[in-house]
Image: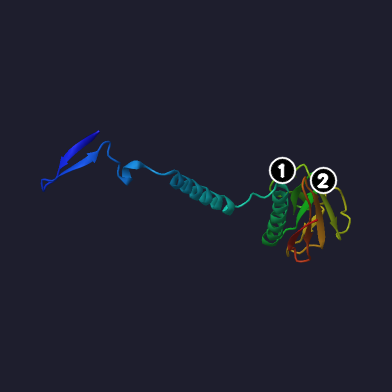
Amino acid sequence: MTSMLISETGRQRLRRWPRRADRCERGLTLIEVLLVVFLVGLGATMVIMTLPTRPSADVETVEQLASDLDRMRRDAIYSGQPVGIRFDGAGYSTSRWLDGRWGPRHRSEPLSYGQSFQFVGAQKEPPSDAWPDYIFDPTGVGAVGQIDYSGTRADYRIHIDVNGEVRIDRL
């Protein structure tokens, strides 16, 4: 089908119907759509790659113990009272020296992680079962010791030096 158009000059010209759509009215080509999808995917990949990874439960448990040991050391210094920790195999509890005996520090029940904690230290054998396995004195100093942790995916050793500083090694 053809139609006649008359221009301002009066000249006639033929135009074919349907007329071709302008570039902006046609939409996107397949290449353009694929390019946009590729760029969005590339951007999403870069975002996902920069997200921090969550540590395993074993790492969280060991870091929690190291943090508790450091907090116990500071608590012994600030309060002027000895603070101790006792391991029962699957967890640990903290205690402090009050009124001539060991009592609970903050929690009345031990923290249980269901994993294996074992204290191996140079500290002397405690006088009774009520005594903690490791004690920080009021100066924040304790004996050299280590705690072995057997987790579900990895084993760790926590070293406590003479100054009470804590270091974690993966076995």
Q: Is the N terminus in the top left, top right, bottom left or bottom right quadrant?
A: top left
> Which percent across, then down, holds residue 143?
81, 62
> Which percent across, then down, holds residue 105?
71, 50
| Label 2 environment density (alpha carbons within 10 Å; few <14, some 14–19, many ≥20) | some
Amino acid at the residue labelled 2? Gly
Q: Earlier in the sequence, mark 2 or mark 1?
A: 2
Amino acid at the residue labelled 1? Ser
| Label 1 environment density (alpha carbons within 10 Å; few <14, some 14–19, many ≥20) | few
Q: CA distance from mark 2 to mark 1?
A: 17 Å
Residue at screen point 70% across, 58% down: 70
Q: Is residue 30 above or below residue 80?
A: above
Of residues 3 and 107, the one nearer the viewer is: 3
Badge 2 marks a residue whose secondary structure is: loop
Quarter of the image for residue 30 reads top left
- For residue 31, side relative to residue 158 (left or right): left
Quarter of the image for residue 134 reads bottom right
Residue at mark 2: 89
CB under 8 Å between callouts 2 and 1? no
Q: Is the C terminus in the top left, top right, bottom left or bottom right quadrant?
A: bottom right
> Which percent across, then down, holds residue 101?
79, 51
- For residue 17, side relative to residue 107 (left or right): left
Of residues 103 and 4, the one nearer the viewer is: 4
Of residues 120 and 81, the one nearer the viewer is: 120
> Which percent across, then down, holds residue 24?
32, 45
- For residue 145, side relative to residue 18 (left or right): right
Residue at mark 1: 108
Of residues 70 and 127, the one nearer the viewer is: 70
Rendered image: mark on residue 122: none
Residue at screen point 78% across, 47% down: 151
